Structure formats: structure tokens, C-alpha cells
Image (cartoon, rainbow, N blue to C red):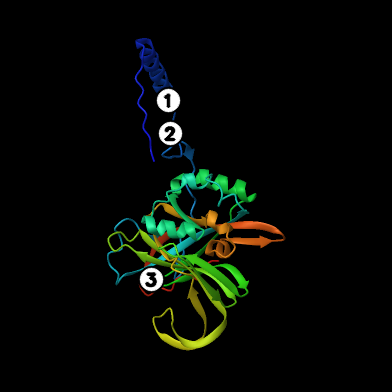
Amino acid sequence: MRFTALYAPRFRQFRLFGLWCLLLATAAGSGCAAGGAVSDGGAVGKPMELPSAPLASGEPMRRVADAQAAAPDRYTLVVQLNVFRVEVPFGLVSHSERLWRYLDEELHEVPVLARLHRNGFRVGRARTAEWDRVSELLRDMAGRSLIRTRRLAWPARPAPLTLREHQGHQRIFTFTDQGLLEGRDYEPGDNVLMLTCHLNANDPSEVLLQVAPVVRSRTRVRRWSRTEEGEYELGNKPVQTPVGDLQFTVKVPKGHYIVIGPGQAAARTTSPGHRFLTAEVRAARLETLLVIVPEVFAAPAGAPAAPAVQ
């Protein structure tokens, strides 16, 4: 809830004194040269430095500008996912607002936000031009420099992001929209976030990022699956089981990034947030944060793209 307070000065001299201070501040600020990106709060920060463009047939792809790439028969669009995976001590993110105050979390309807929070997930979005403050805070929390990986993702094709490997039998309880707690047992395997990128037809530079937590089984079963060429093949494939109804979609315009991290409910050991976004390494409890920056590139149609960089 936002409160607005109005103050009426009692004395005329206070009003004159305030005007004099304002004139002094304006005169002092007029001689400052502009530099760097200015955030909404007025702090100067460095924008995020993104890696070079991926290659197609040995040539760099072109970054897609707003409302560009209108000839799909001449260009193929591909999304490069830049991912920072940050491990911090337990509680620094889930039980603190130090990070989340820099992010916009009002990205979904209230029932979706409530469901994510109850299950130990939080999602926020911010501008890459205001990355400096967040990156400095994350480095302080993690006690190390941030490491970025990148990979290519084709639109509308799921790209797995493995968070916890070689998990045993798991019993995970999820809250529904009605506030009911439902439990399910999962076979041994990997806890994975399936990332699927969808493009805005009117503005190809805008990505709709669909995120779904799934458990990918260690055992494989013989079944049909679709290849990257759009054909179907029969082979031994793992079974991917969604975890509750936790799929969500985030709009990521050009020049923005999202953060996925644990909420307070991740302290519940059977919650999805605990199973996916926390870990115990050498008796130390850690939380996992994901910073995801999607970029859309255009490659000549038929040109093979360079393999994903992990």
C-alpha cells in the first residue's frame, strides 16, 4: 500500500529557504557531464555487457531490432540465452528483500504470484541498463565473480536447464490455486527447468519465456520423440514429469533480464523451491539464483547455427 503525505509550510521564510536550496542544487548539477546509464532512482550504473553474436556458417548473426525480420523465408530467428547461475548462503535471498527491491515482481496475475510464492519460487524483471547495482550485490552475496554461460534455443522448442543432478526418490508437495497441498513421488533423476522461448509476432525482439519445473527420470523408456529437424524418431528417452502446476510465462522485452530465485517457502524441505533452488554442499546450505537474459538473433535461412556454448 502506498501512502502520500502532504506538508504545508507554516512560515514564509521556510519556503524561501527551500527555493534558495533548490536553485543552488540546480546550478551545481548543471555543470556535471552525463556519463553511464541512469536508473529510475537516479544512481549511475554500468549496463550489462553481453557477449558477441553467435555464428551461422562462420558469420556473426544480426541482433534483431524492434519490429524487424519480417521475411521469415530469408531469415531464421534463434534465441541466445545468457545465464548467470549464482550460489549464495541459505537465507540471503529467500529471507531478505535486499535483492528483490531492485526487481519488478508484478509480472503475473495475483493467483499465479500466490502459487509461486507458496511453493518457494520468486520471479522478477529489470533492465540490463541498471544491472550494475544488482551484479555488485550478487557478487557480495556469493563472495565471487559471476560466471555467465550461453546457449542457443530455437523458438517454441524446450531447452533444459539442469539444476540438481542425480537426485534419488523425491516426495514433493505443491500448493494449488485453491490452497490445497498435493504430494507426489518422483523417480530418481534430475531436477530441470524447461525453458521455452516464444517470439512476439509484432516485435520479434521481445521474448515470452515459458518456464516449467520438471523431474527428468534416470531410467529411459522406448518412445517416439521429435528431432530438431522436425521429424520423429524412435529411441530410448527419459520421462519428464512436471512438478505440480508451476509452469509460468514471463514477458522479456529487449534490454531486460529476469531473475528466478527461492522464496521463504523454500525452507520447507518438501517444497518445489527447496528441491530445485537449494542444495547442501560440504555441510553448507546454499540457494541458487538464475539470471536469464534472452537475445534474439537472425541468421540466413538454411544456414547452420554454431553449437550452443555451455
Residue 54 marker: none
Give the number of the mark in front: 1 or 2. 1
Residue 305 sits above or below residue 258 on the image: below
Cα–Cα gap, marks 2 and 3: 42 Å
Res. 60 visible in picture: no
Q: Residue at x 44, y 62 (%)?
A: 179
Res. 100 visible in picture: yes
Residue 29 marker: 1
Q: Residue at x 58, y 53 (%)?
A: 146
Residue 34 marker: 2
**Amino acid at the residue labelled 3:** Ala
Q: Position of residue 111 (x, y in %)?
A: 38, 58
Q: Name the secondary structure under disc 1.
A: helix
Q: Name the secondary structure under disc 2.
A: loop
Residues tagged 2 and 3 counted as in contact (Cβ below 8 A):
no
**Amino acid at the residue labelled 1:** Gly
Residue 82 sits above or below residue 216 on the image: above
Q: Earlier in the sequence, mark 2 or mark 3?
A: 2
Q: Position of residue 172 (x, y in %)?
A: 54, 69
Q: Residue at x 41, y 72 (%)?
A: 157
Pointer 3: what residue? 156
Which quadrant of the rendered structure holds the C terminus? bottom right
Cα–Cα gap, marks 1 and 2: 10 Å
Residues tagged 1 and 3 counted as in contact (Cβ below 8 A):
no
Residues tagged 1 and 2 counted as in contact (Cβ below 8 A):
no
Q: Position of residue 130 (x, y in %)?
A: 46, 44
Residue 271 sits above or below residue 186 on the image: above
Give the number of the mark in front: 2 or 3. 3
Residue nearer the viewer, 172 or 279: 172
Q: Residues within 10 Å of mark 1 (few under 14, many from 20)?
A: few
**Amino acid at the residue labelled 2:** Ala
